Image (spheres, rainbow, N blue to C red):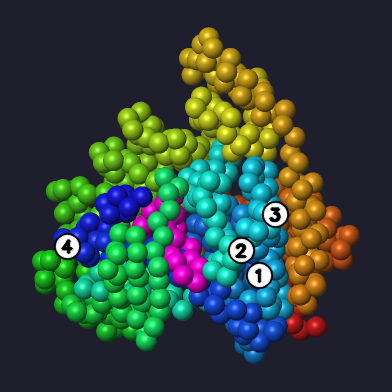
Amino acid sequence: MRRKLALVLIGLCAALVAMELVLQVGAWIQWQRLQAASSAGAGTGAPGETVLCVGDSFTYGLGATDPANAYPAAAERELRAVEPSSTLRFVNAGWAGSDSEAVLARLPQQLAVNRPRFVYVLVGYNDFWSERRVDPADAQAFPIELRTLRLLSLIVAWLRGGPTDETPATSGPGTPVADRNLAPFLGPWNRDGVWVEFRPDGRIETSNGELPALWSHDARQIHLDDRETKRRTSIDWRLADGLLAVQGGPFPQGFVLERGLPERSSLERGRALRRRGELGNAERELRAALDDPSLAIDARLELAGLLADTGRAAEAAAVLEPVRRAFDAGAEAALGRRLADALLAADRRDEATAVLVRLLLELPIDDVLVQQLARVGLRTDTRALDAAVEKALHREGLSKTQRIGLLGLRPVLNGEDEAITLRCLVEVARFAGDDSAFTRTVVWNRARFTREGFVQAVDAAGLVGDERERVIAAFDAAHAQQDLTGEGLAGNLARIVDVCRAAGAEPVLMDYPLDRPSIAQAADEVARLRGVARVRLWDEFRTLVAGSRREDWYIADGHCNDRGYAAMGRIVARDVASRIRR
């Protein structure tokens, strides 16, 4: 994993020391965030001042452009608008890939740390395929089970990140807790021009892009778990006098970082000012940086983001033109990904599509690109992008998760065309027919994916002999599988309700902003038997999305986009407001 992270960081600076610094800081930050929450203990905040939101990726905010756009944060803003006197703070304790047993196992510690008045529970999507159970002794370990859904919900979940069951779990006094928002080192840190930002959602942003790992921590160490290799790197950390010291692993001599973004150049000052919300001063600094050839590309990307955020898309597009020419002259993957996002923010769909097509066809495909396509695919020229995806699937060297990710994207880009959907499902069955995600896809779409239609798709794909029989057998086995999601889910939801009430918190059960009958039925059953409140997201979303486009509310893999999470936030805020008015 260190070698992979080093490749990501090498652009940060030429010096090996700086490159290693980013590695260590990244690991340290990820580990430290959760540790800070642990050290904060149960005394944080007064009882009843928080709304605890627990669940999986739909709580975590997968698909949002920023953690501040996940539904808990959106609900807090909305509640402030409708109830200005409210002092409730929303805590996002969601983690992608969690099933109901994982949520239940971690709940006592989360309740002790946050002492919430209300607990909003949204879980069940991963119960269908969960193969790992959380042992009580491991309940407070870093919640990486990431089988995160990165693809079309109709086809398959993909890009599972985080450690496997073989990854050692921490335990004892240094065991991490789930509320990363309480970590004292959240935010950016820097040294010698290199910066690293520890995000409350577990990601690590650096001056050279996002690291391919997720962090966790205990009282002594930061752990970086590589999303692809599942390998872990651990580094000691300590926070003292406003400085962050890290030592161990690749840095036996240790490093010390200062809080905040570096501000040595106009680019760095502009970036720091933008993060602080001083947009006028930030724009002046960033425009000054355009005159420095060594800073101009990064300054243009940063400035374009600022302009797009303030409603000046045409200006942003003009600022990006030299960046586009630079990419055309010498394509580089990291620059291309950043440029595509910036062009989409500037409402330049065709130009962004052209950049993504080039990344798919000319440069090495990695998990970061596949994640980006799942996030932005519906905002592009979908026909052109789909043609590129189809060609990219024939490239050598694709990993299993990358291939599944691209296959899952195609039906979405084609409006869920039946023939293309079945063709992609056949391809998934060819190399992942025993995968639990394939099984869930077939079971949850039993009415759509008939055996007759699947066999026709197999024959249309030209499969013969043993391979044909194996693929059809995989479909038959999946089709015969019962959807037992509701059975185990109902039991765990009932326990979640009991644990919340024992801690003096009022639980509220939700279903998804998607049509998942078995999950809604389990929540309904527990709500009836335990006399607990329900928030019916799908009923609300069914009305919201009627007559609109899928991409108005969701990203390509079925998770919400910013608008969808904002709608979830409004629904939850309305429910909270009704409760505090009683």
**Quadrant housing the C terminus:** bottom right
The answer to the question of whether label 3 and label 1 lie on touching residues, with beta carbons closer than 8 A, is: no
Residue 558 lies left or right of residue 187; in this view the side is right
Measured as percent of width and height from the top left, residue 413 is found at: 46, 41
Vertical placement of residue 5 versus 424, above or below? below
The answer to the question of whether label 3 and label 2 lie on touching residues, with beta carbons closer than 8 A, is: no
Residue under circle 1?
109
Gap between marks 3 and 1 measured at Cα:
14 Å
Residue 465 lies left or right of residue 381; in this view the side is right
The residue carrying pointer 2 sits among few (fewer than 14), some (14 to 19) or many (20 or more) residues within 10 Å by Cα, namely many
The answer to the question of whether label 1 and label 2 lie on touching residues, with beta carbons closer than 8 A, is: yes
The answer to the question of whether label 1 and label 4 lie on touching residues, with beta carbons closer than 8 A, is: no
Gap between marks 3 and 2 measured at Cα:
13 Å
Label 4 amino acid?
A: Ala
Label 1 amino acid?
A: Gln
Label 3 amino acid?
A: Glu
Picture disc at residue 101: 3
